[in-house]
Amino acid sequence: MILIIGGRLIDPKSGIDEFRDVVIDGNRIKYIGKFHSDGAYQTVIDARGKVVVPGLIDVHAHFRDPGFTHKEDMQTGVAAAVRGGFTTVVCMANTKPVSDTRETLAEVLKKAEKASIHVKTVAAVSKGFGGAEHTDMAEFKKMGAVGFSDDGAPLLDGAFLLKAMLAAKEADAPISLHEEDTRLIGVQGVNDGAVSRRLGFTGAPAVSESAMVARDCMLALASGAKVHIQHISCAESVAVVRLVKELGARITAEATPQHFSLTEEAVLQHGTLAKVNPPLRAEKDRYAIIAGLKDGTIDMIATDHAPHTAEEKNRPIPEAPSGMIGLETALALGITNLVRKGHLTLQDLIRKMTLAPAGLYGFPAGFLAEGGPADIAIFDERQTWTVSDFASKSSNSPFTGQTLNGKIYYTICGGTIVYRDEGIT
């Protein structure tokens, strides 16, 4: 058994925020209360001065396996996840080949079974991400896909998407949408605004996202499907989601740490490391995202962990791929830019990184309770650290060199310590 002693326990499901000890027996939490280290425990973790929370859950990540393992693979993706306090990660379907066949989905699921944390996957909405031919959602759900997404390839045909929503509803699974109308975009990954003009090209305007969000929110309302809006980036999109939730649509939305932490100005400082789809936008958009997180319009925080090689990112901005890694910095960015600045309480932040994402897929996770899963992260919210030397195979992050608050010391999944900071004595 494992005894975690002296920590500040935060459970978003019960609302508990108190100093309590936790006893782990096997893969479950046996007791929560006050206990003594009396020799009955194989491992005692001193959590005094630290926070004990459910293992973090990321509903949007790219492990690049199969097909792009020079960027990331299942093993290095998991290593990045546990270093960031994540015990459950949902991988996207834009592998090579795309997860649009039984064979590819089975390969991903087989690799996921061997992981030290809970690795889940969505399957593609359309074959080859072409947006023209539907996949067999019912079959893929039976195989183990938790939902469906063509993330990285927006679905431009509204009629096609409506049929997909109805199929996802029949399969009782969410459909997650990458909202960008590429027909309205010049260079992807950079906001169409002051920075793109300074760089000499047309970028991605906010309307390329908000127009798609508006259409798809209405389709969600009409279909009754469970629809998830990915990596929301602009003020207009937040307003649309807020309205359609009031109308009764089964809509959820996510925001990434990069979109609540940075603006388009980061492209001038960090170049392609700050190039991401949808792009970092203006300060008004960043504040709209924070407001959406505060009032519940945006339900959860997801990383959109997207590894690329240094060679790829060293290309000119218009030619480099979009995306940045994020699993190792997500919690600290939330603490630094949301909690310490008074936008969210620590309880609110943890809810948006545990219970809320668990609810999207109905995972039995995201909470701490006797008899519940022993998936736990332990961190010091006050401890500062400098972003460097990633566990990920890639290092494409604009946050490298920044000093952040909130350091993970332990990640426990299924009652097993899967990450322990080397600085712990």
Image: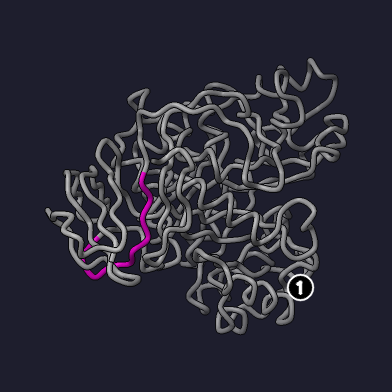
Q: Is residue 204 left or right of residue 377?
A: right
Q: Which residues are magenta?
A: 369-378
Tell me, yes or no, whether the highlighted magenta stretch contains residue 373: yes
Q: Residue at x 63, y 40 (%)?
A: 390
* Residue 350: percent from left, percent from top: 35, 45
The way the protein has been coloured in the rendering is one colour
Q: Is residue 373 left or right of residue 79?
A: left
Mark 1 surroundings: few (<14), some (14-19) or many (≥20) residues within 10 A: few
* Residue 235: percent from left, percent from top: 52, 32
Image quarter in which the C terminus is found: top left
The answer to which of 163 and 3 lies nearer the viewer is 3
Quarter of the view holding residue 68: bottom right
Q: Is residue 341 left or right of residue 11?
A: right
Tell me, yes or no, whether the highlighted magenta stretch contains residue 368: no
Q: What's the residue type where badge 1 is placed?
A: Glu
Residue placed under numbered mark 1 in the picture: 133
* Residue 259: percent from left, percent from top: 56, 34
Q: Is 338 located above or below residue 293 in the figure?
A: above
The answer to which of 342 and 166 lies nearer the viewer is 342
Q: Main secondary structure of the magenta part?
A: loop
Q: Residue at x 47, y 64 (%)?
A: 226
* Residue 233: percent from left, percent from top: 57, 37
Image quarter in which the N terminus is found: bottom left
